[in-house]
Amino acid sequence: MAFCSNPSQQISMDDAILRLSKREQKYLKNSWAQDFSENVFTLINEKRFEVLYSKNPATRPNNPVNIYLGLLILKEIFNQSDEEAVESLMFDLRYQYALHTTSFQEQPVSKNSLSNFRTAICRYDKENNTDLLKEEFKEHAEKFCKLLKIDGRTIRMDSLMISSSCKKLSRLELLYTCLKDVIVEVEKEGKLELPENLKEYLRSEHHNERIYRCKDTEVSERLTEIISDALEMQKIVSNASLESSNKTNLLSRVIEEQTEYTTEGIRLKDSKEISPESLQSPKDPDATYRTKAGKKYVGYVGNVVETFDKNGSIVTKYDLQKNIYSDQHFSKDFIEAMGRQEEPITVMVDGAYYGDEIAKEAEKNNIEIVPGNLVGREPNGDYSLFELDIENQKILKCIMGYEPVDCKKNGETYRAHFAKECCGNCSLREKCPVKEQRKNYLLQMKEVHYNSALIRNKLGTSEYRDKTRQRAGVEGLPSILRRKYHVDDMPVRGLIYAQILFGLKIEAINVKKCFKKSIAKRKRNLAISINYLFLHRYRFFEDIV
């Protein structure tokens, strides 16, 4: 298909809107469809998606991209399936009005249109490492901020764990499934003759016999047997065309991750030796394992960046990665993406996002990172009791005014000695991190300890607490994404496919925020009009009297 844009709607003589009464038209223009038509549909940049289509102008033109994308957003807003969204476009005039299709004789969307469009975006992302939807929604977010008059100088971030939709498998079942998938594939190809012990996996009852009827005491023995069969199968297909198939690659991967070669032969790794990046399910090879706050997760982690002020809030950036991706990684990515800022920006984060190196890098870009707390073990003493000269790399004095006898920096650690007569009877001795030695007192301090101590001191001030309280608003987004948008039940598998759906859900949240603002504005304007009319009539009657 060749790319063809859909910049405007040509209204026909039998347009569906013209058949409505004035009362019905009034209700339609006061509904969400009017806001979507004016503030969302018109923002869609079709030209961005031209790369998904053929460059040959002689081929059949594509259906309008802005209608596809607009319908995908509405689908997430109203929590519909693809079929329900297509039916709504066919029979609900509000959908047609929102997507500018009221004059179409037939709606340009079929049963598989939306899934094919998403697949094309995912394929392009895989081949070019470019998420077209993320670029599009980033541009929308900037325009939403202008619409809501959000200045963009204050930002807050939060992350959430997102479960994979694949079934959670035990170690035994994982190895069994990967092996059986290859055996079934080889049997269908019919190119190789399987030995009798591997043909057993094709029996319908074999799975229950080997997995569900396995006693705890037999697990180790069964694992050894399945690994032996897997190695045999791997050897059989090593010289065949199936060697490069996806299922064969997964079998090789799981063998490599679950076993290791020793002088005595191959052995199963202990469960603690297996990497969190190891395969969790052959149905979702990108999903990873992570334990957070005492809970076990298999899947991904999402990060949301919300720009806010007194006028409202909009999610301006988002990301989805394997769940082993840390909050500090998200911080680094955010700072790198923002670059040098002409005006200062304040970013409010949880303690997991904060790090000394991250704070320094942010400062170079005129960005202030404000953590609500600090993670990690509490230090043995208050390092802010000392004055550190970072430029000259030395400790100048303590809070009591005593200068060190000597001071050196070894690597990242400052070492300073203080006289015994200074520290022995000091009133702050219990808080001070110095250690008594035979001739003097020794202070060992890193720059990161010093900076963390300064932050901890700020955490106790009322001014800083009031500042960090503003971050609380973003903590509601993970709950909304789970309860209303069901991110833990996304009907896709694979990181790139999950990123596409996650982005659509973020866009739906932003659009609904704009809807609320527009509705509130209309109500306010109506109230002003009513008050003006009432006042005008009151003055008219007052003049008569």
Image (spheres, rainbow, N blue to C red):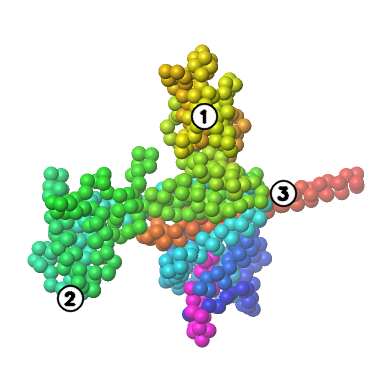
Q: Residue furthest right?
A: 544
Residue 537, image x, y percentages = 83, 49
Cα separation, mark 2 vs mark 1, equals: 75 Å
* Residue at mark 3 to residue at mark 1: CA–CA distance: 71 Å
Q: Is residue 472 visible?
A: no
> Where does residue 99 sit, x and y in percent of width and height?
57, 68
Task: Pick the quarter of the image with the C terminus.
Answer: top right
Q: Which tag, 3 or 1, sits closer to the chain's start?
A: 1
Circle 2 SS class: loop
Q: Nearer the viewer, mark 2 or mark 3?
A: 2
Q: Residues within 10 Å of mark 1 (few under 14, many from 20)?
A: some
Mark 2 lies on residue: 191
- The residue that disc 1 covers is 407
Residue type marked 2: Lys
To which residue does mark 3 refer?
527
Q: Earlier in the sequence, mark 2 or mark 1?
A: 2
| Residue extending farthest top | 425
**Is disc 2 surrounded by few (<14), some (14 to 19) or many (20+) residues within 10 Å?**
few
Residue 496 % position (x, y): 42, 61
Which residue appears at 61% of the width and 52% of the height? 340
